Image (cartoon, coloured by chain):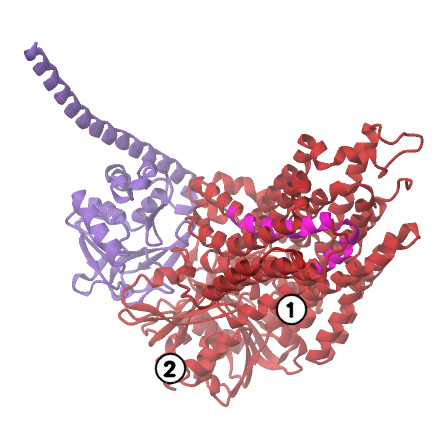
Chain colours: A red, B purple
């Protein structure tokens, strides 16, 4: 048996780790396109249990595979490489429809089959790493270092690839990388032996070339027929005329040649005009917006004046405005038609800007090239945080954060509508300026009520004496617009507001001095929900109102940035009782899906960790444990089983590695979120923070060998102490760090962030290989099982971290992670006397 | 002996024929019973939601129509066993046939009279048009997806609702030659209510629009044009749910 893994093997491990991480990100992208993002999250997080399955599989077959180690590694590399596209293609053939899941039980079966199919590639990738751990017991730190560094590079690589290629085509890159890794292993394993590998090498190269140059029609995405793009494409004369892809989403431009497209959300019922010719723009086959034909004549887009978002332009004339989330330009078109002198427009996705500015510039009337408009590719919140300018109007219309629009998870963090964000926006208003936020109507209202609660909270905190004097809200049958003024609303403004509403049959929800008779006249709801909410929230009992409301409308904060988390447990029984009469839509299912995913992950983990422990103790190598000295109590003879000690020691191993699995991701997820606020662009922030963590953890793992060899027994305490210290320091001093970094330039912000994360990541890479190194000396048979524990803990950790952050915030999450590290240190498998 | 064989042969043949007929009759009988049960379920739900619907019960004629129209004839073969479950069912092309409870409420909200002229935008499988045909003299329906329109026409013909005027095409401009209408149902949700449709609504006419996803209808928007041609809307939650508890 080889005792040291050669560099080629470490390289192969790095390649497979990079590919597995890339595959994970890629599946997320692909499922967000063909399905919906929250299910994408659930499917992929559970497919990662392939790591757990691999642990058990290797634990039971470790000797067999160890004997033909290189063959086993090469087989698994190739199996990963081909199963990655095959399993995705198979999974997308399953007619799973998330919207039907509450009505049709068979959908659960479909969902489970997708889990199982997608588990396979991760299982093969995990086999490569797990088996290498077992084979090179004395060198676990080098293998873990290769694994983490590979994953770090994979996280950057896949984002770069997503900029260059369509996501489905990246599946071919993964096939090639698997083949490449297998070739490296074969060259290394059979060198100097009389085995002719030339045929096999040629075969690999030919397959690779065929994949690169053959037509890729077989890689077509099977988009759900229930997505809005699929539905539009059923209309005769419609076709996709352009498609662009980036990590931010797949953008499709659809033209309808026979039936004109008419996208005018929130249009007044009194409107008599129609939108001019439009092109539909979809992100991830959903979230439709439109590019509107514009010839410079504002009359042709007068329909835009028939929506609630037009209100601020009718209250007074503006000179400088800021549009957050410019998208395909309808807000700019509206501002333009009101002859605004200077417009700053912020849009996250450069491809959307390019569409309007370059590709369809003639169609859009060169709207984005106008001298009055300054375009910024940036994230809305981040732009405001660093801007020094003040505006007459800051406009946010029907904008959701990156997570929602890019097809990530619906329970994703959203920093656009937190208390701190609204505070930021208000600080950028000039005297008498407006902040205007438009949202879709929901019945009964949730986000609109939460927004009201947040705005009122912010005004109260800013010691505004009468917050009610600064707020206006109106609604149509489809949208509502909330305006907060930097100053007291005048009687003239109220007069204009009334006229605006009357002409368009919009209902005033709130303005200073409104009476109950004025609300709920045009679009009649069974109760004037929003008016009641506004008056209650402005009154003395706002806290009681928030507590009594059946949805969670507690203002979101940067520490708990879950604006779209409306779920309250106590409402669940009532909603369940309304199931038959179609009331199930009231269930804010995002949160429940998280809980469901967590329960599934726990059940699967118990099955994978505990069941083998009970059924195949001998085969797992656990009885050996008592024969070795992992936990040999004094006075006990080696070789004689001691049931108590035996169960105690494997429990100790389990606790140690499980705690590490949980804690690593807790910290990683919490810091990714914290740094998004500093680095602005969520995509780059996630990539930079994640890859820094993984790469430095890889370095830490490599270095940990030195600590393992150290004669000092409590060596584990060193990294744990540093993690705890840095964790506490960063989380308590985060506001000062952010304040300092936001003052610096773009590049230095990134460099400083990397420098801050690096030492933390470095130390976080140590405990796992240190524990594993100890086990490899005392009970090496346990290594694959431990690998499985780590896999299961990681899956549970990712879901649990979100749930904890929703409930208690990121600071608590970090402190919890530190406690878990300390607990792990306590359970370090080192406390028994050495042999 | 030969004669006995002959008699036995014919008895078997007649038996099989009878069996085939009776199975059809039995199946129809089962569907009839399921429809009856469905109507009772809808009645119970309406009682629970009466405060929100502003009425104690639905128009008996609407419930009779639900009890009469064979929903199983309007769903794909693989969905037939669930035809009388109170839930939406997929009909292909990313479309669904609405939950019967919602169909009942939407139809009731139109307050259909026998002599009315009703327009439906989005025929789907034709089920809603068939229900309307049971209640009013003139039903007009437009579907933009060719395949769905063809299937719906076939369903309506087979079930005897051939008085329904069906057309394939864009519903945005309504049905100019048949306008004005006493009622309009827009089941294919657009980003806004097309102004031409509001124009084609008679004074005192009503338009109903379900808002939400295919399997998750969220609320109903009822557009009412008064005798002075002034338009107002009502947003109706089809279930009894008050977001606020306590006194504020």
Between A402 and B232, the one nearer to me in the picture = A402
Q: Earlier in the sequence, mark 1 or mark 2?
A: 2
In this rendering, do the residues under marks 1 and 2 share a single chain? yes
User: Secondary structure of the magenta portion, mostly?
Assistant: helix
Which residue is disc 2 drawn over?
A363
Q: Numbered disc 1: what chain? A: A
**Which structural element holds mark 1?**
helix
Q: Position of residue A80 (x, y in %)?
A: 56, 54
Question: Which residue is pictured at 26% across the width and 64% down the height?
Answer: B170
Question: Which residue is pictured at 82% across the width and 61% down the height?
Answer: A703
Q: CA distance from mark 1 to mark 2?
A: 35 Å
Which residue is disc 1 drawn over?
A421
Which region of the structure is painted magenta? Answer: A117-146
Circle 1 packing at 10 Å, graded few (<14), some (14-19), many (20+), is many
The quarter in which the C terminus of chain A is drawn is top right
Q: Position of residue B9 (x, y in %)?
A: 11, 18
Q: Is residue A102 left or right of residue B96?
A: right
Q: Looking at the image, which residue sits at the far bottom?
A: A371
């Amino acid at each position: 048996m080889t005792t040291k893994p050669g560099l080629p093997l470490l390289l192969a491990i790095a390649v497979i780790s990079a590919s597995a991480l890339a595959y994970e990100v890629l599946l997320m992208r692909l499922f967000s396109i063909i399905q919906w993002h929250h299910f994408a999250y659930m499917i992929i997080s559970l497919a990662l249990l392939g790591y757990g399955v691999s642990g058990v599989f290797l634990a039971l077959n470790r000797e067999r595979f160890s004997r033909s180690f290189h063959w086993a590694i090469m087989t698994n590399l190739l199996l990963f490489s081909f199963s990655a596209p095959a399993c995705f293609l198979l999974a997308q053939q399953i007619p799973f429809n998330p919207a039907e899941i509450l009505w049709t039980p068979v959908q659960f079966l479909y969902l489970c089959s997708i889990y199982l199919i997608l588990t396979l590639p991760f299982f093969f990738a995990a086999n490569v790493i797990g088996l290498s751990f077992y084979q090179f017991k004395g060198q676990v730190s080098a293998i873990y270092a290769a694994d983490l560094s590979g994953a770090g590079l994979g996280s950057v690589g896949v984002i770069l690839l997503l900029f260059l290629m369509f996501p489905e085509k990246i599946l071919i890159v993964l096939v090639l990388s698997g083949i490449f890794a297998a070739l490296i292993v074969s060259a290394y394993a059979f060198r100097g032996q009389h085995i002719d590998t030339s045929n096999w090498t040629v075969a690999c190269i030919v397959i690779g070339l065929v994949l690169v140059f053959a037509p890729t029609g077989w890689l077509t995405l099977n988009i759900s027929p229930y997505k809005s793009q699929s539905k539009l494409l059923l209309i005769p004369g419609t076709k996709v005329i352009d498609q662009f892809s980036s990590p931010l989403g797949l953008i499709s431009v659809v033209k309808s040649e026979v039936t004109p497209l008419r996208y005018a959300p929130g249009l007044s019922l009194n409107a008599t005009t129609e939108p001019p010719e439009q092109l539909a723009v979809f992100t991830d086959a959903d979230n439709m917006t439109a590019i509107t034909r514009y010839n410079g004549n504002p009359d042709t887009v007068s329909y835009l004046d028939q929506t609630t978002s037009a209100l601020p332009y009718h209250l007074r004339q503006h000179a400088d405005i800021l549009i957050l989330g410019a998208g395909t330009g309808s807000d700019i078109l509206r501002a333009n038609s009101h002859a605004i002198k200077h417009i700053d427009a912020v849009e996250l996705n450069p491809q959307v800007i390019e569409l309007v500015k370059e590709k369809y510039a003639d169609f859009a009337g060169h709207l984005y090239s106008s001298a009055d408009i300054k375009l910024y590719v940036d994230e809305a919140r981040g732009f405001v945080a660093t801007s020094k300018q003040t505006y007459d109007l800051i406009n946010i219309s029907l904008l959701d954060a990156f997570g929602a629009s890019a097809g990530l998870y619906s329970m994703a963090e959203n920093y656009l509508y937190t208390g701190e964000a609204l505070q930021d926006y208000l600080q950028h208003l000039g005297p008498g300026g407006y902040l205007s936020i438009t949202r879709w109507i929901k019945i009964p209202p949730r986000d609109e009520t939460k927004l009201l609660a947040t705005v009122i909270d912010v005004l109260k905190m800013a010691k505004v004496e009468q917050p009610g004097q600064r707020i206006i809200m109106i609604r149509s049958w489809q949208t509502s617009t909330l305006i907060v003024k930097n100053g007291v609303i005048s009687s003239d403004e109220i007069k204009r507001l009334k006229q605006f509403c009357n002409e368009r049959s919009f209902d005033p929800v709130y303005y200073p001095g409104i009476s109950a008779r004025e609300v709920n006249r045009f679009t009649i709801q069974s109760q004037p929900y929003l008016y009641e909410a506004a008056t209650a929230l402005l009154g003395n009992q706002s806290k009681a109102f928030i507590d009594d409301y059946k949805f969670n409308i507690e203002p979101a904060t940067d520490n708990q940035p879950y604006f779209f988390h409306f779920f309250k447990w106590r409402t669940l029984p009532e909603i369940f009782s309304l199931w038959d009469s179609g009331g199930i839509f009231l269930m804010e299912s995002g949160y429940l899906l998280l809980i469901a995913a967590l329960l599934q992950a726990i059940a699967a983990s118990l099955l994978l960790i505990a069941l083998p422990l009970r059924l195949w103790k001998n085969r797992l190598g656990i009885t050996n444990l008592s024969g070795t000295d992992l936990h040999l109590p004094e006075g006990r003879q080696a070789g004689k089983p001691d049931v108590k000690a035996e169960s105690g020691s494997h429990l100790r191993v389990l606790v140690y590695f499980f705690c590490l699995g949980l804690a690593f991701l807790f910290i990683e997820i919490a810091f990714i979120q914290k740094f998004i606020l500093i680095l602005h662009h969520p995509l780059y922030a996630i990539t930079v923070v994640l890859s820094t963590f993984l790469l430095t953890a890889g370095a830490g793992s490599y270095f940990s060998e030195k600590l393992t060899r150290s004669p000092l027994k409590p060596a584990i305490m060193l990294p744990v102490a540093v993690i705890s210290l840095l964790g506490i320091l960063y989380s308590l001093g985060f506001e000062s760090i952010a304040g300092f970094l936001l003052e610096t330039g773009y590049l230095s912000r990134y460099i400083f962030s990397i420098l801050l994360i690096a030492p933390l990541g470095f130390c976080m890479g140590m405990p796992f290989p240190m524990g594993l190194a100890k086990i490899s000396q005392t009970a090496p048979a346990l290594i694959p099982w431990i690998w499985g524990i780590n896999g299961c803990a990681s899956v549970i950790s990712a879901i649990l971290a979100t749930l904890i952050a929703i409930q208690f915030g990121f600071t608590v999450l970090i402190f919890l992670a530190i406690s878990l590290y300390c607990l792990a240190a306590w359970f370090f498998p080192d406390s028994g006397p050495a042999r | 002996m030969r004669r006995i064989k002959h008699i036995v042969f014919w008895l078997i043949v007649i038996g099989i024929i009878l069996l085939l007929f009776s199975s059809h009759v039995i199946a129809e009988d089962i569907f009839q019973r399921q429809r009856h049960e469905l109507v009772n379920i809808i009645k119970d739900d309406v009682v629970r939601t009466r405060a929100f619907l502003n009425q104690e019960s639905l128009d008996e004629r609407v419930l009779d129509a639900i009890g009469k129209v064979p929903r199983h004839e309007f769903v794909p073969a693989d969905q037939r066993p669930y035809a009388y479950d109170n839930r939406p069912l997929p009909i292909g092309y990313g479309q669904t046939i609405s939950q019967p409870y919602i169909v009942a409420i939407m139809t009731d909200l139109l307050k259909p009279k026998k002599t009315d002229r009703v327009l439906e935008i989005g025929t789907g499988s034709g089920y809603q048009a068939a229900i309307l045909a049971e209640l009013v003299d003139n039903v007009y329906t437009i579907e933009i997806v060719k395949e769905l329109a063809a299937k719906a026409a076939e369903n309506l013909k087979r079930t005897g609702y051939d008085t329904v005027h069906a057309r394939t095409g864009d519903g945005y401009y309504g049905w100019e030659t048949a306008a004005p209408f006493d009622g309009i149902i827009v089941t294919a949700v657009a980003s806004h209510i097309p102004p031409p449709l509001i124009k084609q609504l008679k004074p005192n006419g009503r338009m109903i629009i379900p808002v939400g996803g295919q399997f998750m209808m969220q609320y109903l928007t009822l557009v009412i044009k008064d005798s002075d041609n002034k338009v107002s809307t009502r947003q109706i939650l089809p279930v009894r749910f008050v977001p606020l508890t306590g006194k504020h």
